[in-house]
Image (cartoon, helix red, strand yellow):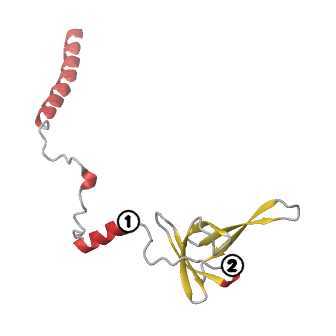
Amino acid sequence: MIKSTCLLFMLLLIIPMASQAKLDEIFADRKDIIEKPFELRDPFQTPKFKSKEKERRQKEFNGKFERNVQKLDKQVSVENIEIVGVLIGKDRRVMIKEGSEVYTLREGEQLGVGGPEIKAILAGGIILVEQIVNIYDEPEYIETVIPISQ
């Protein structure tokens, strides 16, 4: 009785291993494995073709806003400016309207001659930092937040 039970137990162990070996043999040379699945395009989307002109402009632009930039090179009061827009990218820019002229400035530049420095350009506006001397003759920094004008 013990021998037959051991024999039955051995058969139950060997049969699944043999079937697994057979499955491995069948699926060894599969042709349906995708090498780089994330490089495939979505089959439900139309292919996106770029014209040579669009590729050239995109390569030339490359996230930098340097064309037609007009610098603010005069003394300007913070009360007289309007934030027309911000450009978010590699080099952040802010479009400032003073009078009828629109100027483009970036982070780190001063607002006019000797004016406050543009410390940060955010999606909702800009942060200006101005250094003043307090009544104790110590330098002090004042931060001003200017939102985008409506």
Task: Inspect the image, locate mark 2, and give the three-letter code of the amino acid beneath it.
Answer: Val
Query: In the image, residue 9 lies at what x, y percent?
Result: 23, 18
- Residue appearing at x 12%, y 31% in the figure: 22
Residue 78: assigned label = 2
Compared to 33, does 66 lie above or below? below
Residue at 19% across, 13% down? 4
Query: Mark 2, residues whose alpha carbon is within 10 Å: few (<14), some, or many (≥20)?
Result: some
Q: In the image, what residue occupies the spot 38% across and 65% down?
A: 62
Percent across and percent down for residue 131 are 74, 65
Kindly identify which numbered label has been placed on residue 74: none
Left or right placement of residue 88 versus residue 150 in this view: left
Q: In the rendered image, which quarter contains the N terminus? A: top left
- Residue 140 percent across, percent down from the top left: 78, 62
Q: Position of residue 115 (x, y in %)?
A: 68, 72
User: Which sits in the foreground, 129 or 19?
Assistant: 129
- CA separation in Å, label 1 and label 2: 32 Å
Q: Is residue 39 left or right of residue 21?
A: right
Up-down: is 35 above or below 21?
A: below
Task: Give the residue number, with chain letter if any, for mark 1.
Answer: 62
SS at mark 2 in the image: helix
* Quadrant of the rendering where the C terminus is positioned: bottom right
Number of marks: 2
Residue drawn at x 46%, y 66% as measured from the top left: 89
Q: Quadrant of residue 113?
A: bottom right
Q: In the rendered image, is residue 96 in sight?
A: yes
In the image shown, does 87 or 56 lie closer to the viewer?
56
